[in-house]
Amino acid sequence: MENFKTARESRMSITQLMLPSHSNFGGKVHGGHILNLMDQIAFACASKHSRSYCVTASVNRVDFLNPIEVGELVTLKASVNYTGKTSMVVGVRVEAENITTGKKRHCNSSYFTMVAKDEDDNSVEVPGLLVQDALGVRRFARSKFRKEAAFKRDTKFDESNFKYEEHLKQLKKENIKIELK
């Protein structure tokens, strides 16, 4: 196994025409179809980086910024932004292009945490990330921060640590009716 690889070595891009079979009841491309494509390209990118079968461990926030129309070309771009011991964060960007006007729109971006596995389903080490520019440093640092923030959030609301009394005052401002027994 190589010790370090650049993001460029495993970067991927795919483009697909959006068909009527990809649409939802509102006539737009179904978000689930886009998520499926995003997961596929994240898998391919992570597998190429690690030279291992990879599984999706988590997806960090998917915001649908712009709808995608049937008949548009959708391009998904993926690259490894962060490497841990056995996991990688793959950034995925989705753009739609109107084929008659050529106008492109950023539709969403998301971050997939992928874990490399061996044939016995054990996690295996992945090559580190060789970063060669300021953008790579920013992406790596941002992924590390997101990972740490998620851990803090998860442990703060862990069932064994959670103290509901600390949140009651804040929750009174929300659309909630609390009747504790």
Image (cartoon, rainbow, N blue to C red):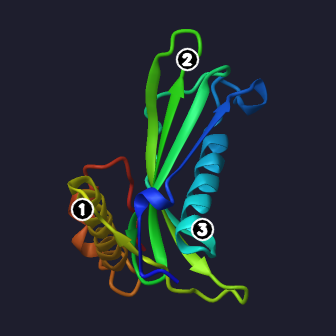
- Can residue 80 be seen in the rendering of this structure? no
Residue 137, which numbered label? 1
Question: As shown in the figure, which amino acid type bears the numbered disc 1?
Answer: Val
Residue 93 versus residue 26 in the image, above or below: below
Q: From mark 2 to mark 3, how far is it between C-alphas?
A: 31 Å
| Residue 73 horizontal side relative to residue 65, left or right | right
Residue at 72 percent across and 85 percent down: it is 119
- Can residue 6 be seen in the rendering of this structure? yes
Image quarter in which the C terminus is found:
bottom left
Depth order, front residue of 113/153: 113
Indicate the secondary structure of the residue bearing disc 3.
helix
Labels 3 and 1 touching (C-beta < 8 A) = no
Residue at 48 percent across and 60 percent down: it is 9
> Percent from the top left, x then y, of residue 149?
28, 69
Q: Earlier in the sequence, mark 2 or mark 3?
A: 3
Q: Residues within 10 Å of mark 1 (few under 14, many from 20)?
A: some
Question: As shown in the figure, which amino acid type bears the numbered disc 2?
Answer: Asn
> Percent from the top left, x then y, of residue 104?
46, 23
Indicate the secondary structure of the residue bearing disc 2.
loop
Residue 30 versus residue 68 in the image, above or below: below
Q: From mark 2 to mark 1, how far is it between C-alphas?
A: 33 Å
